[in-house]
Image (cartoon, helix red, strand yellow):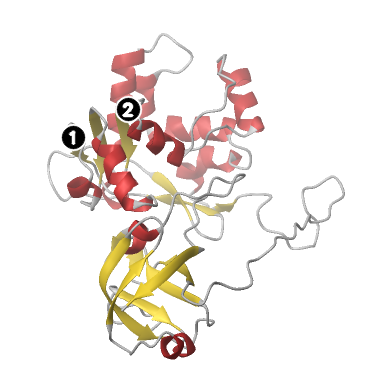
Amino acid sequence: MTPKLKEAIFERLQSNYGLQLPTETGLDTLACMEEAHAGRMKFGLCLGGNLFGSNPDATFARESLSNLEMLVTLSTTLNTGHAHALAKETIILPVLARDEEPQPTTQESMFNYVRLSDGGPSRHQGPKSEIEVISHLASKVLGDEGPIHWSNMEQTGRIREMISTVIPGYQAVKEIDKTKKEFQIEGRTFHTPKFPTPSGKAKLHPHTVKSSNPDNQLQLMTVRSEGQFNTVVYEDYDLYRGVDRRDVVLLNPEDVTRLGLKANQKVTIQSVAGALKNILVYEFPGIKAGNALMYYPEANILVPRTRDPRSKTPAFKGIPIEILA
């Protein structure tokens, strides 16, 4: 969720489609969770993903989603949120994965390339695409009398046409089903040291980094493994770090000795947000002394809702913890 549209997108939606958009700042994801926890939000519609599993402070996240009157999730895969964060009424709508889509869609690579995805045959009868579900709901609720004809939005080509008009750098997406040519989004890759600032130079901002922790504290970061996509874990083995399970805390050998611990010892990890029991100590020389590493989303119960004031990003990489033997 984004609390505010980028100015170019905001202006193009208004000028191209005759919309009068609200100007007040909206809620980011964590703010929505806090509103739900306080009882000021009644309904949630989740387009894929795992809102429970991707939030910090798993106890608070469970309470927030369980406090909703209704939660509807469009999902391609079952996840922990479907079992551990149920509203008073929860509806899980299975939808088609990208490789089952009946119409061509697009995907964006990690290198800013937009590519056509042709889809393929569905594995089961019944599920619809996300696009079909959303456009059908919007058509029923909003109708087709306004500037957006929602029933037409069931066609992915119409969506790409709108994207090309509204999103800077995406003009080529309009014809991608005909050209079949991938394209890179302009303004995201720099081949010369010139940046989109008035001076053309990058702006660097120094930050004060906490240099040390109390003797009984470590700084925890949570990470994903190689065999994982977002909150979905496909295998326990982590090829990146050579670790064979996920109920572990990775520590520098110096810290293992300093804290009087032993390899493969079961410990409790505790933070201001919560605690995890029966975690195995793994020695890992690749991590700097004073720090610890655990896996996301299993360690979310330890992550407080502290977030950066500007980006609103929770502190998944900087969590003070204690290890209790």
Q: Quadrant of residue 29?
A: top left
Q: Is residue 146 above or below residue 102?
A: above
Q: Position of residue 99 (x, y in %)?
A: 29, 52
Q: Amino acid at mark 2?
A: Gly
Query: Which residue does the image show at 52% across and 52% down from the upper left?
Result: 181
Q: Residue at x 18, y 39 (%)?
A: 127
Labels 1 and 2: the sequence-earlier one? 2
Residue 288 versus residue 114: which sits nearer the camera? 288
x and y percent of residue 70 in the render? 23, 29
Residue found at the far right of this picture: 199
Disc 2: which residue: 39
Quadrant (top left, top right, bottom left, bottom right) of the C terminus: bottom left
Q: Is residue 44 above or below residue 320?
A: above
- Asked whether residue 132 is in view, the answer is yes
The answer to whether residue 68 is left or right of residue 197 is: left
Question: Residue 203 in the image: x percent, y percent?
Answer: 78, 54
- Residue ranking furthest to the left: 125
Give the total number of marks visible in the rendering: 2
Q: Residue tagged by mark 1?
A: 91
Q: Is residue 310 left or right of residue 277?
A: right
Q: Locate residue 229: give its quadrant.
A: bottom left
- Compared to residue 11, the image places residue 273 above or below, namely below
Residue closer to the observer: 93 or 127: 93
